[in-house]
Image (cartoon, rainbow, N blue to C red):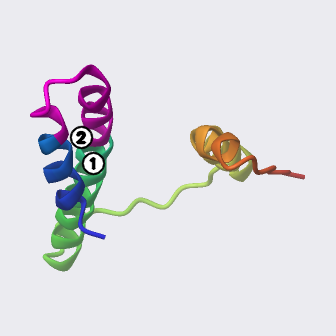
């Protein structure tokens, strides 16, 4: 899905001069701007990798810490969808 379509729709909501559509429009814009930022960052990283300018460093890591952080970052979405995540 193209995130620019949502940005365009949010712009139209903001033009209505009503508080509720304005709040919704701002929320949509914020979400889509975050999404576009991640996409652009990914594209830049791919370009660096293709050009051989991306340096990868291998190191040991605590997988439990990585999983805990991933669950923490997804917490809002998990709750929104009334899902349950169990990590053993």
Occupied quadrant, residue 17: top left
Q: Residue lying furthest left in this view?
A: 15
- Outermost residue to the right: 88
Question: Is disc 1 placed on a helix, strand or loop?
Answer: helix
Q: Quarter-wise, where is residue 20 in the image?
A: top left
User: Which residue sits at x=17%, y=68%?
Assistant: 48
Magenta span: chief secondary structure = helix
Q: In which quarter of the image is residue 1?
A: bottom left
Report the front residue among 7 and 70. Answer: 7
At numbered mark 2, what does the secondary structure look like: helix, strand or loop? Answer: helix
Image coordinates of residue 36 in percent, x first then y, are 23, 53
Q: Are marks 2 and 1 in contact (CB under 8 Å)?
A: yes
Classed neighbour count for the residue bearing mark 1: other residues with Cα under 10 Å, few (<14), some (14–19), many (≥20)? some
Q: For the point 29% across and 44% down, which residue is it? A: 34
Q: In this view, does 53 lie above or below 23?
A: below
Residue 83 image point, x, y percent: 76, 51
Horizontal side of residue 6 vs 69, given as left or right: left
Q: How many marks?
A: 2
**Furthest-bottom residue in this view:** 50
Write down the region rendered in magenta: 13-30
Which residue is at 24% across, 67% downward?
A: 2
Q: Is residue 56 left or right of residue 85?
A: left
Q: Is residue 55 above or below residue 68?
A: below
Q: Position of residue 12 (x, y in %)?
A: 13, 43
Look at mark 2 in the image and give the residue it sits on.
Answer: 29
Q: Is residue 26 magenta?
A: yes
**Left or right placement of residue 66 versus residue 36 in this view:** right
Task: Read off the residue under disc 1.
Answer: 32
Other-residue count near label 2 (Cα within 10 Å), few / some / many at <14 / 14–19 / ≥20: many
Q: Residue 45 carries which label?
A: none
Residue 52 in the image: above or below residue 80: below
């Amino acid at each position: 899905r193209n995130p620019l379509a949502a940005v365009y729709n949010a712009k139209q909501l903001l033009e209505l001069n009503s508080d509720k559509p304005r709040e919704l429009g701002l929320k949509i814009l914020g979400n889509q701007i975050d999404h576009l930022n991640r996409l652009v960052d990914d594209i830049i990283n791919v370009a660096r990798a293709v050009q051989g300018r991306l340096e990868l460093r291998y190191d040991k890591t605590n997988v439990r810490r990585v999983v805990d952080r991933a669950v923490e970052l997804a917490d809002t979405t998990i709750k929104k969808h009334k899902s349950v995540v169990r990590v053993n």
